[in-house]
Every structure is written in structure tokens, then in C-alpha cells.
Amino acid sequence: MPSDSVLEEIKSRLDIVDFISEYVHLKHAGQNWKGLCPFHTEKTPSFTVSPAKQIYHCFGCSSGGDIFSFLVKYENVSFPEAVNILAQKAGVILKASQKDAVKTGEKEILLNIHKDAVTFFQQQLTRSEKAKQYFNKRGIDIKAQKLFSLGYAPKTWDALLNYLTGKGYKADVIKKAGLVTQGTKGVYDTFRDRIMFPIYDLKGDVIAFGGRAINGDEPKYLNSPETIIFNKRKVLYGLHRAKDSIKETGYALFMEGYLDVITAHMYGFSNSVAPLGTAFTQEHGKLIKRFVEDVILVFDSDEAGRKAVKNAANILLESGLNVKILSFPDKEDPDSFLRKNGGEAFQQLLDNPLSIVDFFMQQKGDKRLIAHEALETISKAPDKVLQGHYVKMLSEKLMINEIYIREEFKKIRNLSAKGGQAAPPKPQSKTKPSEEVSLIELLLQLSDRVGEITDTLSEDDFKHALTRSVFKKIKAGAADFNELLSQCEGEEKDFLTEISLKKDSENPEKALEDCLNRMRGNKRKILLQELQNKIREAEAKKDFNLLKELQAEQQRILKR
């Protein structure tokens, strides 16, 4: 990890207003700049960028931090990746450790192999009439083929292997990339006689491939194996192209396959993504939640599609997303519906998606079983208000007294708890004691008094976990705001950026004394209450020696 001085060097060469303006439309507002927050939906700008302090903070969703934090959250990259990206932008050369250099070198080689493989597959597509006919039949035009870098793997054993070794790559490294396989008679291409779909990460690098058989071979779809650059549980097909549109529209369209996504993009629905031939995962939910809160499931209308919707809804609801479902006519899927009926008809369906309850109400069969299945899905939502809304809606749709629906819902939740699922931890109270918040603000304003104040206070004087954690860092020596911010993460950064953008106290010395007096007074009240409880216990036990000691301690505190 680069030193603090290197991080400060990067920050000093990049202006946070100029950088964030590449992602958010900012307008000048006094000493700061404001715009609509890219991390949540809002109509009134509450996202503030401070050029003086080189930080941002949203007063709507409480997200805050510096230029590194912004890139991590917006682009969904790790902190080291953000540092590398910004270092290149700033012209700062990073010194990597030997271990990091080896790991970075391996990743770079695998990314280059995949980049060259894309070129090979695209070249083969231009030479294959069979592959061209397949795309023509599916209505995938040249523009879409180029947009998604589609290609074709020829029906040979080692065409790609020979191409890549000719580029200087060794066979064992190509095998690490998952593009060739070791067999009893040697190494051969993993993908043969397949339409090739490159899989991109959020930065726009190809990290894997999906291959679709066009001659009835099995499996129908074949994906690259997992590597150090590819984890299918954390990747959504098309997201690198869809992320901006997802933010603009305020929702994501989740589809089942590659072709559904490509067709949707062709017809203007560029907020479409899909998992990589697997069921949705919690990682997919967390990934999409970085961009939006709302998703619409656009799956096939057959039985397999309905089953997939139920599974996806359970996962995505559990991730805290608002889930709706698009209902297709019988035997239709996104790809076929768009090609037959066009974008306008598809938009009409999108304008009226089904709620979770309405989706289950479309199912045929016993009302009791439908209600039970719906309630199992509803129980996945962490929002209790949303749960209550769904329960009420279900009782109205089924015309069953809400009391009975709620009783069944409680049973299902209890069964779920007994099944070994731990109850979610109670969230830390968002209300922080005002004197603790004020003290942190004033310590940052009066940096020359930090040593004096931190000597008279302990971490135990702070009742809220967040302010206690920040004070601990200040007490350890991080009195400078930028140094403190670099040591904080998550809610700590959000808290610091929020208080740092507040107006400074006109008389900070007096405000500090008042704040300390309030904290001491609160501590005194707590001590006296604890002593009073002990005195009552001593009186009840007739322990007069202890009683005398406790009363003396009580008098000492009262005289202070």
C-alpha cells in the first residue's frame, strides 16, 4: 500500500472538482460546488464538493470521502485499484512491493491474453459464414456485434493456442487464463465452434468469455473457468456498458442471457444486464445496489423463467433492492418479444411491471400454497415497512383477512430463524450525542489544543461507537483533517466529511469549554446514578462498611 505522502501527492496533483465533474454535473455554490448525488436518486442537489478541503459529502444519503473514496464507490473498484488509476492520471509513479508486482504482472498478462483473444475471435467471425448466418437469424446487426466485441471460435483443436503462442504467450499461462485445456493428448482450445461473448469488468477490460454452441453441442453455454481476474459471482454481463444508463433511468433490467441483453441494448434499453448463466448471488445484489435501488426482472414466461424469477427475487430482496417483474405473453422472452413487437411495445410493458405480490397472484393453484410461497419471498426483504405493505397487499388480493396472513407470516419467519439463520444485528443508533459530535468538530478546528484535551478525556467518555472510534484516532496522533480522513473508512469518512463542511464556530474556545462541561456533567450524572444504585444494594444487604465508603465517594463527587 502506498504511503500517506504518496496519496497526498496524488491528491495534490488532481483537483477533486475537476475529477468529479467528469461524473457529476456540478454548479458553483459559494465556496463549494453542488450537484445531484450519483449514489442515490434525488431531485434537489445535496451532493457537495469542497475544493478547499478536497472532499465531497452528500447531505441526502450521508456518503462522503475524498477523491479515492469517490472512485471506489462510483466505479466499484478496490482501494488499491483506485490508487493505481488516479496515480496514472496524476502522473505519479507508484513503487510496488515484489509480491504486489508479481500479482500485478500476472493480472496484466492475463488481461492482455484476453484482449488478444478478442481480436482473434473477431477475425474468425469475418471468415465464418455459419457464424454470420447465426447472427443474422438472431437479428444481431453489425453495430451490436462490434459494440459487444462478439466473435467466433473455429471448429479446430488448437487455432487459438497457435495464435496466442505466436504472440509470445506460453502455453501454461494461456491455460491459467482458461482459454486452453489440458487433455490426455496435450493442450487444446477450450472454446471450439462457438459464438463468443467477451465478458468485461467495470473498467472495460475483458476478463473472461462465454461461448454458445451453434451446432447443438453440449453444454449449450460454456463460460471461462474462474481465474485471478474473473469471479462469476461478482460479475454481471453488460454492466460496463449499462452502468451509466442504469444511473440515468434509476433502475436496472435483469435478464437471463447474453442475447437478451444485446437485443435490449439494440432497441435502446441500455440499462440491461444478466448473470453469467448462473443463479443470482448476494454479490450481484450488492454490486447493482452501488448504482440503484430498483430492479426489474425480465425473464422468460415459461415455467423455468418463473422459477428463476422466484429465486432471483429472494436474493435481490435480501440485498435490500426494490424488485418488480415484467410480465410477458405466453412463450415469449425479451429477445423474441423485442424482435417481434419492437421497443415501443416493450416500453409499455416496462411502464406497468408487476409487484412481487402481483407476480405470485398470477400463479395458478391452491390459494394457501400461493400465499405461503409469496410470504416466504416477502420475508427476505430487510425493510419491515415494505414487508407490512406486501402482507397487506397479499391479503387484499387473496381476499383473506389480514390477521390470518400476518399469523402465517410470523410462522414463516420463525421457521426461517430456527433453520439456523442468525437474526440480523441491531443497527447502531444513528443519533450521536450532540456534545460528542461538537467536540470532534472543535478538535479539528482547534488543532493546537488537541494534546491538552485528549489528555483529559478517554475513549470511555464517548458513548457512541462512531465518535469514540474517531476520537481514538485523534488521540493516537491523527489531528490533521486529511491525515485523519485517510485513516477512516465507511461511516467514519461520511461523518468527518459532513462535520467538516459545517460552518466553523465563531468562538471555538468558548464552545469547546461549554462542550467539555456538558460531557463532564453527563459523566458526573452517570457516576452518581451508579453510586446510588450501589448504595441501595448496600443498604438492602446491611453492609454498613461498604455503605459508608460509597456515601463518602458520593460526597466527593458532589463537591467537585
Image (spheres, grey):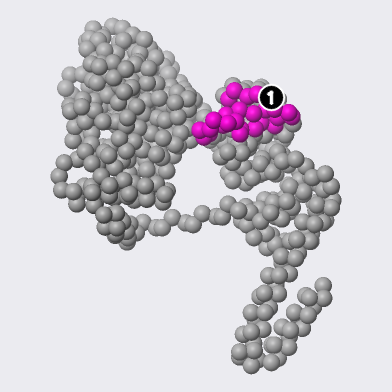
> Which image quadrant for residue 432?
bottom right
Provide residue 22's location: percent of width, then percent of height.
Answer: 59, 21
Above or below for 403 versus 49: below
State left or right for residue 469 relative to residue 156. Answer: right
Q: Verify whether residue 60 appears in magenta.
A: no
Front position in the image: 364 or 123: 364
Residue at the (69%, 92%) spot, across then down: 544
Provide residue 157's location: percent of width, then percent of height.
Answer: 25, 19
Q: Quadrant of the C terminus?
A: bottom right
Q: Secondary structure at mark 1?
A: strand
> Which image quadrant for residue 361?
top left
Front position in the image: 40 or 349: 349
Q: Which residues are magenta?
A: 24-50
Residue at the (41%, 35%) spot, across then down: 294
State left or right for residue 31 relative to residue 248. Answer: right
Provide residue 431's location: percent of width, then percent of height.
Answer: 60, 53
Q: Which residue is mark 1?
A: 28
Q: Quadrant of the N terminus?
A: top right
Q: Residues within 10 Å of mark 1 (few under 14, many from 20)?
A: few
Front position in the image: 252 or 347: 347
Give the number of callouts. 1
Provide residue 516's location: percent of width, then percent of height.
Answer: 78, 59
State left or right for residue 261 relative to residue 498. Answer: left
- Identity, as a three-letter code, of the amino acid under mark 1: His
User: Would residue 158 be seen by someone viewing this image from the given angle?
Assistant: no
Residue at the (66%, 56%) spot, across then down: 433
> Which image quadrant for residue 559?
bottom right
Q: Verify whether residue 35 appears in magenta.
A: yes
Residue at the (23%, 16%) spot, across then down: 340
User: Would residue 265 be seen by someone viewing this image from the given angle?
Assistant: yes
